[in-house]
Image (cartoon, rainbow, N blue to C red):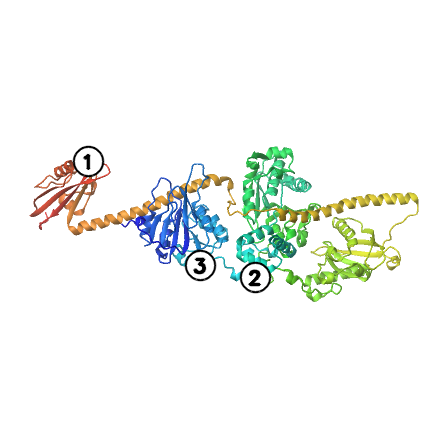
């Protein structure tokens, strides 16, 4: 067989690099791949395997039977040459740098398992100038997934063997889970798919995206293409601010110029993606909120569950994991306090892999524990060289997973969902979808924990309020609403089909607020508004503003228009945007009181300094209207001048003004006490709003580092030991596969040898160094009368004797002298020549006896 490893390669530079990763069960797909892989296109193939350090691989010999390409083992400093297959050596890590191989030997201190496929493909992603592709074949574990993600982000192509065809499908499935795979094919069809991908537009070309006419849409498409996340479901102002912030940092004022920069610069796309993700979290964030959760939900879950039940908690959008660990600690504290034994599991998910990686390590700077009580810190944290590490018992209770909460299916049989301050960034459709997923996943009696500025929206009838201040709810209904297609026309829709409401669309003229165009509203909103009008006309006809309990302005009547500013119809219809600033505080305060179930209507005197009018005092009254809908209650804000307008509304309650001095003092004290309580409530409301803004500001100043490493979502507590066993098993499977193939080759060779001897009509008897029979041909069996079970016995003890020579003594003579001994004599009417040929064997000198008939004889 030709030794292809020593063939002299030509000096032609390669035109493309194809990395092929395979492990357990990878021999057959490798042979199928290279049987159809082209060897005249100038490609360089680099085969990466999991190899045992003490085993000599025969992969070069096996592949040489399937491909006529040059096959070489990789050495340090070796340059890439066209139409060549490169094989990694055992116990070494291979990387690519400037078109040359870098080889590093493994040491005993290196982490296990070794990941040679990830290491090489990641280095390949950093190479520029040549088309690149990676092919992931059969294997167990997840080696290759991180490299595939890096290569895809760098503009390369990733292909995997069909998991149905692969003997071990873990590696192809792990690559598929990253969302970075371009094609899935059977092994023999992968070379054709690689050729098709490499013949497309040159790498780095974003011509498809740059052809999109709207630059805002093009930017959103670039982010979605690079990171598989659709930000069109985020509120438009939030996304616009993020994009404009990155433009400001780059010194760019034109949106089209920024689009062109993103089309050419992958790093700029990553920076914008990092800014889009608002990953603000901390241990015991809002201590009062966590205390309420622990007291009203966690303690009840512990006391109401049984030992056979498992308490299941989901923390979507967990960022770097502090909140998930906080809930795990509170669960452990509740069990410790109650003295009960309960099983619990916390599933924490986030769309950002870098954050999940940080969370999985469980190591945080000491400053992150600022709000953690000393006793908790001592009980559940240990010192680490990089800061403070969460206790292993808590770490094992939390499973971190990369998941898009809006696009992926929800978890089931949940007892608690904690999703704080994610809804505030999403539009109405996305909020409804996410809440419906929580409703679907929660069991009846399960708890939902939202941010202080978030609400249930249309699903509030399915939950009971446990703590209105900290937005803790309990599911009371059996209803399970989950519409997987709710965002079908938003997520994954073609670019330019109303996916994102950017400034160009937002500047379209809106109907005047004073004349509501019912035809432009959905039917349900129009009917709700008509019901509100009916309730309003039954009780009042004053100068007033009709709003919802979420601060949405529906319409206004009479002289109230003097306190409304439509801002050329570009403002949002909210109290903060169009109502006179002097009325904001009182309206928000009254709304909050009524939302929390105040029994009396809210009334306040407000001093107004209106532009173009004399300063005056207005009596503002906020009261709920009869009737309710699924979007929130209607509230009526009545405005009445303190002097001169009281007669306009005889039904309105006047402001009490007693003339007695004691009564005045008592009334004043009561008013101040009431104001103090309301001021506390108002400060809470303002604080919540400021926290929301503060989170965005904090996220703007943080630099999140992207990482391409993947953590297993489940069974992490067993991963360290299991992966090492997987690596050893993969090496054994690879060795076994090569042995099987070598045995097949030897069997073929033996059959060929038998045929050759049969054709020569020669009898052959093979003896070992002790002159024991190792094997013999059928002609020899006829001459010496040997049978199959004579193998292993000494030659002089079995078979018949030749009349003219003692063949056993002839063999001993050849073994002693080391020279061929030959004797010819008469045998069965003809001439028979017996040759004894000494041969070198692994244990000593053996002998081969060859019997040749020179004339025809007669059968005995």
Q: What residue is pinned by disc 3?
A: 197
What whole-number distance in Å separates the C-alpha atoms at marks 3 and 2? 23 Å
Residue 659 versus residue 578 in the image, above or below? above
Q: Earlier in the sequence, mark 3 or mark 2?
A: 3
Which percent across, then down, holds residue 443?
A: 61, 47
Disc marking residue 495: 2
Is residue 305 in view?
Answer: no
In the foreground, 666 or 180: 180
Q: Residue 334 is drawn in which quadrant?
A: top right
Q: Which residue does the image show at 81% across and 45% down from the upper left?
A: 674
Which percent across, then down, holds residue 833?
A: 10, 45
Residue 39 versus residue 22 in the image, above or below? below
- Under tag 1, what secondary structure? loop
In the foreground, 819 or 328: 819
Q: Earlier in the sequence, mark 1 or mark 3?
A: 3
Q: What residue is pinned by disc 1?
A: 770
Nearer the viewer's eye, disc 1 or disc 2? Answer: 2
Which percent across, then down, holds residue 41?
A: 37, 58
In the foreground, 102 or 688: 102
Is residue 604 in view?
Answer: yes
Which percent across, then down, holds residue 636?
A: 78, 56
What whole-number distance in Å separates the C-alpha atoms at marks 1 and 2? 82 Å
Residue 312 versus residue 494 in the image, above or below? above
What whole-number distance in Å separates the C-alpha atoms at marks 1 and 3? 62 Å
Q: Which residue does the image show at 52% across and 59% down from the upper left?
A: 206
Mark 2 is surrounded, within 10 Å at the Cα level, by few (under 14), some (14 to 19) or many (20 or more) other residues, namely some
Asked if the residue at tag 2 contacts the one at tag 1, i.e. Cβ–Cβ closer than 8 Å, the answer is: no
- Under tag 2, what secondary structure? loop
Q: Residue 295 is drawn in which quadrant?
A: top right
Nearer the viewer's eye, disc 1 or disc 3? Answer: 3
- Under tag 3, what secondary structure? helix
């Amino acid at each position: 067989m030709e030794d292809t490893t020593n063939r002299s390669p030509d000096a032609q530079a390669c035109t493309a690099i194809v990395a092929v990763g395979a492990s357990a069960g990878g021999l057959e797909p490798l042979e199928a791949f290279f049987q159809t892989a082209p060897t005249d296109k100038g490609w360089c193939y680099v085969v990466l395997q999991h190899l045992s350090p003490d085993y000599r691989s025969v992969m070069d010999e096996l592949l040489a039977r399937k491909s006529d390409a040059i096959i070489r083992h990789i050495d340090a400093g070796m340059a890439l040459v066209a139409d060549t297959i490169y094989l990694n050596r055992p116990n070494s890590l291979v990387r690519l740098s400037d078109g040359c191989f870098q080889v590093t030997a493994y040491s005993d201190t290196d982490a296990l398992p070794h990941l040679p496929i990830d290491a090489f493909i990641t280095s390949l992603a950093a190479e520029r100038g040549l088309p690149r592709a990676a092919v992931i074949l059969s294997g167990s574990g997840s080696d290759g997934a991180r490299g595939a993600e890096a290569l895809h982000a760098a503009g390369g192509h990733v292909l995997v063997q069909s998991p149905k065809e692969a003997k071990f499908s873990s590696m192809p499935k792990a690559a598929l889970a990253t969302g970075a795979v371009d094609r899935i094919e059977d092994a023999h069809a992968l070379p054709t798919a690689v050729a098709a991908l490499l013949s497309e537009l040159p790498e780095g070309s974003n011509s498809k995206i740059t052809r999109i006419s709207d630059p805002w849409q093009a930017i959103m498409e670039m982010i979605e293409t690079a990171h598989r996340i659709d930000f069109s479901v985020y509120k438009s102002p939030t996304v616009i601010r993020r994009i404009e912030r990155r433009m400001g940092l780059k010194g760019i004022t034109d949106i089209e110029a920024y689009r062109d920069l993103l089309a050419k610069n992958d790093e700029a796309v990553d920076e914008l993606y990092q800014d889009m993700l608002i990953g603000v979290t901390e241990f015991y964030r809002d201590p009062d909120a966590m205390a309420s959760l622990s007291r009203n939900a966690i303690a009840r879950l512990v006391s109401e569950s049984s030992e056979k039940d498992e308490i299941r908690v989901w923390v979507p959008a967990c960022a770097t994991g502090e909140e998930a660990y906080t809930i795990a600690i509170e669960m452990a504290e509740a069990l410790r306090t109650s003295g009960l034994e309960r099983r619990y599991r916390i599933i924490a998910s986030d769309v950002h892999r870098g954050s999940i990686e940080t969370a999985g390590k469980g190591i945080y700077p000491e400053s992150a524990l600022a709000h953690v009580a000393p006793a908790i810190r001592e009980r559940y944290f240990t010192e680490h060289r990089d800061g403070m590490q969460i206790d292993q018992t808590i770490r094992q209770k939390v499973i971190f997973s990369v998941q898009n909460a809006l696009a992926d299916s929800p978890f089931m049989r949940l007892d608690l969902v904690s999703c704080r301050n994610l809804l505030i960034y999403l539009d109405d459709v996305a909020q409804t979808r996410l809440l419906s997923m929580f409703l679907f996943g929660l069991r009846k009696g399960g708890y939902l924990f939202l941010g202080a500025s978030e609400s249930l929206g249309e699903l509030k009838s399915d939950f009971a309020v446990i703590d209105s201040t900290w937005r803790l709810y309990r599911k009371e209904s059996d209803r399970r609403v989950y519409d997987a297609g709710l965002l079908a026309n938003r997520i994954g829709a073609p670019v330019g089909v109303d996916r994102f409401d950017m400034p160009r669309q937002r500047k379209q003229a809106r109907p005047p607020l004073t004349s509501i165009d019912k035809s432009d509203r959905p039917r349900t909103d129009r009917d709700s508004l008509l019901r509100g009008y009916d309730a309003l006309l039954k009780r009042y006809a004053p100068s007033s503003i009709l709003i919802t309990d979420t601060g949405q302005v529906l319409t206004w009547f009479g002289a109230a228009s003097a306190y409304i500013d439509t801002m050329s119809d570009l403002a949002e219809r909210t109290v903060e945007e169009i109502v006179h600033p002097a009325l904001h505080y009182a309206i928000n305060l009254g709304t909050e009181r009524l939302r929390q179930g105040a029994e009396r209507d809210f009334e306040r005197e407000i001093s107004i300094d209106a532009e173009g009018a004399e300063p005056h005092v207005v009596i503002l009254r906020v009261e709920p209207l009869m009737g309710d809908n699924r979007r929130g209650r209607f509230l009526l804000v009545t405005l009445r001048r303190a002097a001169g307008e009281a007669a306009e509304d005889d039904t309105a309650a006047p402001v009490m003004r007693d003339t007695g001095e004691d009564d005045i003092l008592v009334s004043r004290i009561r008013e101040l006490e009431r104001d103090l309580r309301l001021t506390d409530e108002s400060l809470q409301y303002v604080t919540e709003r400021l926290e929301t803004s503060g989170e965005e500001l904090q996220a703007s100043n943080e630099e999140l580092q992207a990482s391409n490493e993947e953590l297993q979502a489940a069974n992490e507590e067993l991963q360290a030991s299991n992966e090492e066993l997987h690596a050893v098993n993969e090496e054994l499977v690879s060795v076994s596969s090569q042995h099987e193939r070598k045995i097949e080759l030897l069997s073929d060779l033996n059959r060929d040898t038998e045929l050759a001897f049969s054709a020569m009509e020669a009898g052959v008897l093979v003896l070992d160094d002790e002159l024991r029979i190792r094997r013999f041909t059928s002609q020899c069996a006829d001459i010496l009368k040997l049978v199959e079970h004579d193998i292993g016995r000494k030659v002089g003890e079995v078979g018949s004797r030749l009349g003219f020579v003692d063949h056993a003594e002839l063999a001993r003579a050849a073994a002693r002298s080391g020279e061929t001994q030959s004797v010819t004599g008469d045998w069965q009417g003809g001439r028979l020549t017996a040759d004894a040929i000494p041969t070198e064997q692994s244990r000593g000198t053996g002998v081969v006896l060859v019997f040749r008939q020179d004339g025809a004889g007669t059968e005995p």
